[in-house]
Image (cartoon, rainbow, N blue to C red):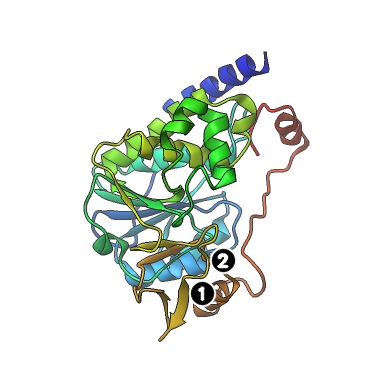
Amino acid sequence: MLQYIWSKLYAQWLRSQLVRRLPKIDLKHGIGTNLILGIARNYSISDLRPFVRSARKFHDCRIVLVINNDPELGKALDAEGVDCVLEDVSSSLGRPHMNFARVTDYVAVLQALSGQVERVFLADTRDVVFQGDIFEALPDAPMIFFEEGKGFSLESAGWNGNAIRRTFGLPVYDQIKHHEVICSGTVLGRHGVTLMYCWEKLLLGQMVRRRHHMRSGVDQATTNVIARVNLVPSSVVMPYDGAVATLSGHNTNFLSVKDGLLVTAQGGVPAAIHQYDRNPAVRDFVYATYDGPKSGKAGDNSKDSTLQKKLRVAFGLQGP
């Protein structure tokens, strides 16, 4: 019964996203048709400085962040050379976990910028830092995914493997379990392909059982299914220590600071590092370089904690 209710509510929420009002985006900063796009709700400017300052240091492209309706944060990001979409998340029945629901923000921005953008880098914001031009560092493939580590397969990475098995079932899991985990927090693609990838994720969400929508793993699970069963033809999967270096699992100590740069064990200089805060020494170097948080990790400060929302989450009718 709960599965039926959840499926109906999720479908209702998804239908509302089909006719969602598109944001009006006036691109004031950067040039060209490359876009770095991130969702930055519930973060402070100190949380975001490493991302935005390093992105602007190495790119003259467009950079757009979706944030809460926070004019002061919008002004601070404008001063950093970043365009913003100010829009609060509406609490509604059927909305999945925020890590997955953000895909609809990607869709809205990409649709609003149709005809103005050719290549898009979808990126987490709190834990990504740049050391070079991501678009120059990677080929112009339809879509590029990035693995999280070596020896970090879906079969051996319990949390990721469980997310696949429990959301899409054993047949899908058995087919792709030998593959390394792909991270959903960094994806690069052509505009139209990226838009279709986002809709694939949302449509696959209709297959997910109710209680698993409440977990952040749905975002990761849908990305791994799309990449590993080839739902984006001609897509490319890059290793964890390439142009985008990802710290995850047992692979958090392969970067070191050398001459003011983060360098891999093989001497490579990644254009971007994801989940850098999983290594305290790397995190502290990044924070010191870009005036990040003064102590500990950057973190969410959710402003949406109403009683109604808490009850919907408790009964499995909405994601956190």
x 61%, y 14%: residue = 4
Q: Looking at the image, is 48 positioned above or below residue 120?
A: below
Expressed as whole percent of the image width and height from the top left, the position of residue 299 reads: 63, 59
> In front of the other: label 1 or label 2?
2
Q: Quadrant of residue 29?
A: bottom left
x 71%, y 29%: residue = 312
Is residue 111 something one can see in this rendering? no
Mark 2 surroundings: few (<14), some (14-19) or many (≥20) residues within 10 A:
many
In the structure shown, which secondary structural element does the residue marked by tag 1 occupy?
A: helix
Question: Which residue is under mark 2?
Answer: 277
Expressed as whole percent of the image width and height from the top left, the position of residue 233 reads: 25, 36
Q: Is residue 140 left or right of residue 22?
A: left
Query: What numbered label is drawn on residue 155?
Result: none
x 47%, y 70%: residue = 254
Q: Which quadrant: the N terminus?
A: top right
Question: Which residue is under mark 1?
Answer: 286
The amino acid beneath tag 1 is Val
In the structure shown, which secondary structural element does the residue marked by tag 2 occupy?
A: helix
Residue at the outermost bottom position: 259
Is residue 266 something one can see in this rendering? yes
Identify the mark nearer the N-term, 1 or 2: 2
The amino acid beneath tag 2 is Asp
Q: Looking at the image, is 80 positioned above or below residue 68?
A: below
Q: Is residue 310 left or right of residue 242?
A: right
